[in-house]
Amino acid sequence: MKKIFILFFLLTSVIFSQEKYTVSGTVYDNTSNETLIGVSIYIPELNSGTTTNEYGFYSITIPEGTYKIQVSYLGFTTIVENINLNKKLTKNFNLLEESENLDEIIIESNIEKLNVRSPQMSVNKLTAATIKQIPVVLGEADIIKSLILLPGVTSAGEGASGFNVRGGAADQNLILLDEAVVFNSSHVFGFFSVFNPDVIKDVKLYKGGIPAKYGGRLSSVLDIYQKEGNSKDFNITGGIGLVSSRLLIEGPIKKEKISFLVGGRSSYAHLFLPLFDNDNKAYFYDLNTKLNYRINDKNNVFFSGYFGKDVFGISDSFVNTYGNQVANLRWNHLFSDKLFSNLSLIYSDYFYGLTLDFVGFDWDSGITNYNLKYDFNHYLNDKTKLSYGINNIYTKFNPGEIKPNREDSGIQQEKLIDKYANEFAIYLDAEHKLSDKLRLQYGVRFSNFTRLGQDELNIYQNDEPVIYDEQFKKYESAEAIGTESYSRSDAIATFNNLEPRVSMSYILNKSTSIKASYNRMVQYLHLLSNTSSPTPLDVWTPSGKYIKPQLLDQYAVGYFKSLKDGDYSIETEAFYKDIDNRIDYINGANLIANNEIETVILNGRARAYGLELLIKKNEGKFKGWFAYTLSRSEQQTLGRTAIEPGINNGKWYSTPYDKTHDFSINGSYELNEKWKFNTNFVFQTGQPTNYPVGQYEFQGLNVPIYDDNRRNADRLPAYHRLDLSATLTPEKNKNRKWQGEWVFGIYNVYGRQNAASINFSQNRETLRNEAVQTSIFGMVPSVTYNFKF
């Protein structure tokens, strides 16, 4: 017995005293020398692994020994190499696209998939190649419309801006382009997104279990990274379509050291309108830029920017302009093989304006922020990784300014009062492998929001900007009894919040896991809108003395399974969201050019819950997915006192983003080297709306009557459509530098007239009230020629 004890002691001593070393490096695309995000680095012998961060860096610490290291990434050939680890090792990898390599490595079937094991859940990732295959209206590949095919993501309909995630509003999505906030994601009122698919490298949508590094929004985070520019060779990529074209130029300034990227898009359909005696206009343009300087193995500097503008005009009497401008200067620094850092200085601006020449005035407004953030990835060992950092955002809100544009307009110049705010946050996030079966990701974010001083702030009796009229039983705007003035450094209101996050995964077997998550989020900015989707005239406003920040608690649980060595996968999740201080509007609220916006707002609550299913086929000639979501999204605003009824008599009512059933099918089939076919089908329950409950006659007119206590009690007809596309790659592409392809598409194959809205008005001939449906698209054919050389 004594000998056995001594032997056991010696063995455990050897095991626990075994030296550990770190393998670290960067993973690149062999063709362009771009870094790759989310590449799996896996050690089969230890059943351990990691993934590359947003800049292609990885680090893993393991015991001394000889191992296989497997490097895999979707769309690229997997690398398997042997390493002899007896000291710390820097190991960079260059991956080849699968189509470029004849001797593809076959991975053993028993190797586990890291995405099944990861505690991260409620995340969808799309590559630029996948996005370009999805048929969309007018032939333009589109990130936002691709996301709508995923479970839990819907749109407000055709011609509507933004997107909705798990029953949340469009303003509850944090949209980042190279870490810079994008306030409006749409061109031409939702027909196109602002993201040029040629420029995009990585797209990731977080719907829940959101890491602590992100904050400021409730529903989702859409994190998009641009390419860095080819540092090996010059490339020109582009496409020519029926209504728009795009061009991307990238290449080295100094080979494998300094690279640049410039990409632009523009629509031009409006140029042909004068041929038909039509002087209306609707067009957009945007420009993406990036400069990448790899100073040495430990330091990289990036400068990236986006500039976009939309113009919509009816003759010269009505012209609407809006757009985004962002710029970001970033410095990556590697302190050691275990500590990676990124320092960013970011500028973001969203402007929107209106010219009404027939009235005689111009209207301009916008929101601008300046963001400083410093993030760290600390790879402590093979079981623990820390992420931590700070973030400070200073924001200026320009609610609007009206100016006369001609002398006889009779319009007086007026400036709504600018608002200012500062948001500071510090966070700590940990990924922790507790055992071979249990993994955790947990962290906390502390946020401080200060509403800074402004020129004037209204004062109301009892601090109530909204009052209830008992006689007429309705809410009304209160009259201000005075004003207060502040210096810019004063704090009108301050909010502090802790935002805990936790996710876990439990491995049932090598291909199956269950996951669960909880996250609390706080949103200090509010988009004031009485429409179901954002419009350029909607106004952002900060929390303050009369407007509270929105608070979210979200719970989710899911089941994940990989079938046939990853050829198929099944993901299903159930979620519940509870939101406090969700803005609601009194009946008859006027939001445009309102300098006293607090007088039409009440604080309510919201909730959303549902079940999501995603079945994917990942390999073979036929690939695709089926997505289904069953959900509810509701809002409630109770009365503040016993005599007040609240909104909708204090009852829960459907939000404009409530879609009970939402399912989509996406498929792609590679017939041969020349022809590829793609299709998608979308079905959504009709959007909640209000129909008249009666009518009355006034001076010979039939006027519809709406019940203020039946908010969103009716629905538009169900939305559905089928899209098809075919891609022709000419055989002459082989062995020549110029590569071209034709993409033929049909949007809405069977010409479904989906209702964007239904309005009730009097027929001029019959003098009866009638319902008039507005539809944006019927069947739309398209053709696009894409090229690269």
Image (cartoon, helix red, strand yellow):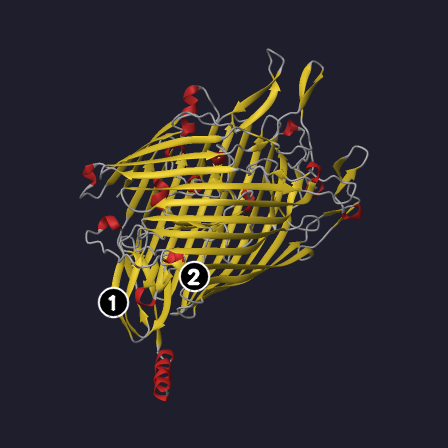
Q: Mark yes or no: residue 499 visible.
A: yes
Q: From the viewer's perspective, tell me whether residue 701 is left or right of residue 77.
A: right
Q: Is residue 748 above or below residue 337?
A: above
Looking at the image, which is closer to me, 770 or 424? 770
The quarter in which the C terminus is drawn is top left
Looking at the image, which is closer to me, 422 or 408? 422
Q: Mark yes or no: residue 198 visible.
A: no
Q: Is residue 351 above or below residue 441?
A: above
| Residue 331: mark in rendering | 2
First-in-chain label (2 vs 1)? 1
Dot in front, 2 or 1:
1
Residue at the top extreme, as displayed: 765
State the CA–CA distance, disc 2 to disc 1. Answer: 33 Å
Q: Is residue 98 above or below residue 700?
A: below
| Residue 370: mark in rendering | none
Q: Position of residue 321 (x, y in %)?
A: 52, 36
Q: Position of residue 138 (x, y in %)?
A: 39, 32
Amino acid carrying label 1: it is: Asn
Q: From the viewer's perspective, tell me whether residue 74 is left or right of residue 719.
A: left
The quarter in which the N terminus is drawn is bottom left
Looking at the image, which is closer to me, 296 or 530? 530
| SS of the residue under disc 2 | strand
| Residue that numbered label 1 is attached to | 82
| SS of the residue under disc 1 | strand
CB contact under 8 Å: marks 2 and 1: no
Picture residue at 65% right of the left edge, 40% below the top:
652
Question: What is the crowding at mark 1: few (fewer than 14 residues within 10 Å), some, or many (at least 20)?
Answer: few
Question: What is the crowding at mark 2: few (fewer than 14 residues within 10 Å), some, or many (at least 20)?
Answer: some
Amino acid carrying label 2: it is: Trp
Q: Position of residue 38 (x, y in %)?
A: 38, 56
Residue at the bottom extreme, as displayed: 2
Q: Position of residue 234 (x, y in %)?
A: 28, 49
